[in-house]
Image: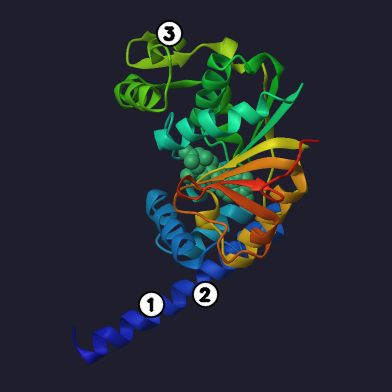
Amino acid sequence: MSKAASKAKATDTALEDIEIELFVRALKLRHGYDFTQYAPASLRRRVLQLAHAHHADTVSALTTRLLHEPDFLPLVLEGLSVPVSEMFRDPDVFKALREQVFPVLASYPQINVWQAGCAHGQEVYSLAILLEEAGLYERTQIYATDFNEAALKHAQEGIYPAKEAQLWSRNYLAAGGSHTLADYYSARYELIKLDQRLRRNVIFANHNLVTDEVFCEAHLVLCRNVLIYFSDPLQDRTLALFRDSLVRGGFLCLGTRESLDFAPSATDFTPVDAARRIYRLGSRNAGKE
Ligand SMILES: C[S@@+](CC[C@H](N)C(=O)[O-])C[C@H]1O[C@@H](n2cnc3c(N)ncnc32)[C@H](O)[C@@H]1O
């Protein structure tokens, strides 16, 4: 690349950065959604993808739509929030929950689980199935939250492409499932629908980890593949929120690319299975509440 071309590219990038900053500010001022503390590189990528998807020549054109078209907000949130998931994603994590966490949960008369960043609900149904098979579901309340309203609606419907079923069935067995996944869904044309009985103890709710407060008193908080999108200070805030939501001796499960290491709240937790990012609030001998 010639010197002149690389200078022009740097100017374009700098200009784009300004436009992205203004877009994020508009999102906050106009709609109250605060992305200012999301990790800059991935946020930048997603804003540019959004501009591309909506045929906007510039990010400023997106900002104009965001300010003036009320119907545009859900599309923006969908584009920025990456609601990608799968059933029994990282099956060994679900196996570890079943083997190391469920026996402790079994000692509580009522079990509250907060699943934060539930996306399209695949993890919610996965958890419900394992809790059902462990005989714990009847006394469990799962609070499944996300800030993306469209994702929550999808999660409630529990309808997914049938082509996913093969991988999810393998995941289910690897997670230690004791039946076959097909026992929990009905298939029609290209779609599968999860058994709606699995939803009987689930409350889906809109909750924003950036701006909202403690959600419930939980025995298990599962928040996987959400913190990766946050800057370090926002991760710290969110981890403190989870700590404050958990009963003493409660469990926290993060994504495999996330960890408590280096976070100020690390000292509040003890690793239960560090490789699978499962932690327990309090000391190794933490008692039950
Ligand atoms: C990659 S998905 C993770 C889904 C699932 N937990 C998993 O690991 O398969 C990230 C989810 O986090 C949600 N999310 C991102 N920022 C959030 C926030 N500030 N408050 C609540 N949810 C948020 C997104 O809407 C998206 O559904």
* Image location (x, y in percent) of residue 53: 39, 49
Q: How is the image coloured?
A: rainbow
Residue at mark 2 to residue at mark 1: CA–CA distance? 10 Å
In the picture, residue 167 is in which quadrant? Answer: top left
* Image location (x, y in percent) of residue 227: 55, 54
Mark found first going from the N terminus, 2 or 1:
1
Q: Secondary structure at mark 2?
A: helix
Q: From where the camera sits, is residue 268 visible?
A: yes
Q: Which mark is residue 12?
A: 1
Around disc 2, counting alpha carbons within 10 Å, would you say few (fewer than 14), some (14 to 19), or many (20 or more)? some
Q: Which kind of residue does numbered mark 2 sit on?
A: Ile
Q: From where the camera sits, is residue 69 visible?
A: no
Q: Is residue 283 above or below residue 42?
A: above
Q: Which residue is drawn at the image coordinates 52% and 75% (left, top)? A: 18
Q: Which residue is drawn at the image coordinates 51% and 11% (left, top)? A: 195
Mark found first going from the N terminus, 2 or 3:
2
Q: Which residue is mark 3?
A: 183
* Image location (x, y in percent) of residue 169: 35, 21
Q: Which kind of residue does numbered mark 3 sit on?
A: Asp
Q: Secondary structure at mark 3?
A: helix
Q: Which residue is mark 2?
A: 18
Q: Is mark 1 within 8 Å of ligand 1?
A: no
Residue at mark 2 to residue at mark 3: CA–CA distance? 52 Å
Which of the image's four quarters has the C terminus?
A: top right
Around disc 3, counting alpha carbons within 10 Å, would you say few (fewer than 14), some (14 to 19), or many (20 or more)? few
Q: Is mark 2 within 8 Å of ligand 1?
A: no
